[in-house]
Image: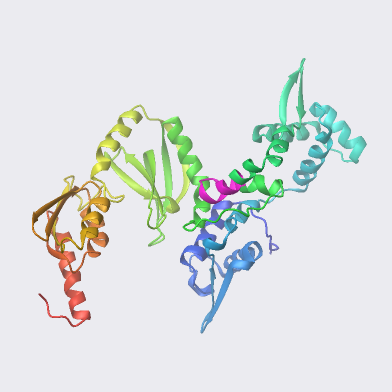
Amino acid sequence: MSDFQELIKSFPKTREYVRDFFVYGFKTRDEFREKSPRTYDNERRRLESWLGYYVRKDHVSNGANISLAIDSNLLDTNPLFQVWKTKSFTDNDIVLHFLILDLLQGGGALTAEEITEHLLTGYEALFDVQTVRRKCNAYAKEGLLQKTKAGKSVVFSLDHALSDWIGSNDSMLDALSFYQMAECFGVVGNYLTDQLNHRNESFRVKHSFCVHTLEEEILMSLLDAMNRKTNVHLEMKSSKNGMTNTADCTPLQIFTSTRSGRRFLCSYIPASKRFTCHRLDTVRTVTPLEPSPEYDELLSMLDRNRKHLWGVSFQGNGSRHLDRLVMKIQVLEPSEQYIVNRLMQEGRGGTLTRIEQNVYQYEIEVFDANEMLPWIRTFTGRILSLECSDKLVEQRFYQDLQAMYRMYEIDEV
């Protein structure tokens, strides 16, 4: 039986657990049916170790519900950044990390052979030259060390110029503090401010979506594919039924909901010759494929189609035709001009016409009128009529209205 280890080798597995506790939460040990009880216990213990202050336990009849309670209004950083700082390492990894960096603190430039010799004579640490060279090359690739040519030799050095400049520049430290709270890949800003012992005392973000950091690894791979204009193979796990599926697609844009904060990958599926959107939090792996020769053309097509996109659905009722929706709204003039303003500001390209006193008509053509229903319901009580070319949308709206009448015991009009 293996011992419990707080550090992890595989981030994707932990990402799913943190998301389960933070986004869905309130599940007992028995309700995590996809994993074994021992796996659940290990992940729970890791979570309590990393984020103990935010772990909430609600005791119920069949156990305890575990969840994460995080109020973004009060945070000076994203606590989920801690999950990125839990990578496991070998004994040689950690010893070489500190010894090499300590050896090069003086600013000198040394070859891998010289570093190996100094490790033995100065620290009594015996390492193979190839091991030291691989570590130095890896650190040079990550930007921790500088790798340069000195004659026929390759030398490695440590340059403090950038960190010294950042540490002495209050404006840059403030910029990093803001960046870690407000932008993608904020964990980079968090790493830098942590290294410089700087704490964010200036900024708070009212609508901060902490869980976004769990998707950053996937987002980076997708942005890299977009930059290279290549196709990708996606492996996804449904948040509804837990089923795993795959798709080969051309990634084009990332959409973010201003209401829920949920992020989506908008891509083109060559097999079906259609645009589609995948929730970013359902994507488990991204594998790059061949370059897409028609990438720029697909981007232009997407730009033309976006004017008919209400949310993220290009599907509608399964047809390739646009849904046409017409809604008549009663507005008491002039005291309710704010309703007219709402229709104009939130109508997303729809046409608003005053057809008579106190009556306005809103028209729009979209790919999927189903996505409009939550917005349309906010005008309940003012809607005089609603017509849609997709009759299922129209039927659903009136059925919901009748259900509300019955719930509140209101005579139907």
Quadrant location of the C terminus?
A: bottom left
Quadrant housing residue 382: bottom left
The chosen color scheme is rainbow
> Hey, which residue is sitting farthest front in the picture?
334
**Outermost top residue:** 151
Please state if 17 lies on the left or on the right of 165 as rendered: left
Q: Is residue 379 left or right of residue 153?
A: left
Determine if residue 39 is in view.
Answer: yes
Which residue: 52% across, 53% down? 214
Residue 272 shows in this picture: no
Query: Is 155 above or below relative to 123?
Result: above
| x and y percentages locating residue 353 in the rendered image | 12, 51
* Depicted 35 relative to depicted 323: above or below: below
Which residue is at a point 54% across and 68% down the rendered structure image?
Answer: 69
Residue 220 placement (x, y as % from top left): 50, 41
**95 in magenta:** no
- For this orientation, the residue located farthest to the bottom is 61
Residue plotted at (21% across, 58% down): 337
Q: How many numbered tags mark residues here?
A: 0
Residue closest to the eye, 75 or 45: 75
Residue depicted at x 88% and y 33%: 118
The image shows residue 35 at horizontal and vertical percentages of: 52, 65
Q: Nearer the viewer, residue 177 or 356?
A: 356
Q: Is residue 375 left or right of residue 103?
A: left
Horizontal and vertical percent for residue 45?
A: 64, 67
Highlighted magenta segment, given as a residue range = 176-189
Residue 129 against residue 317 in the figure, above or below: above
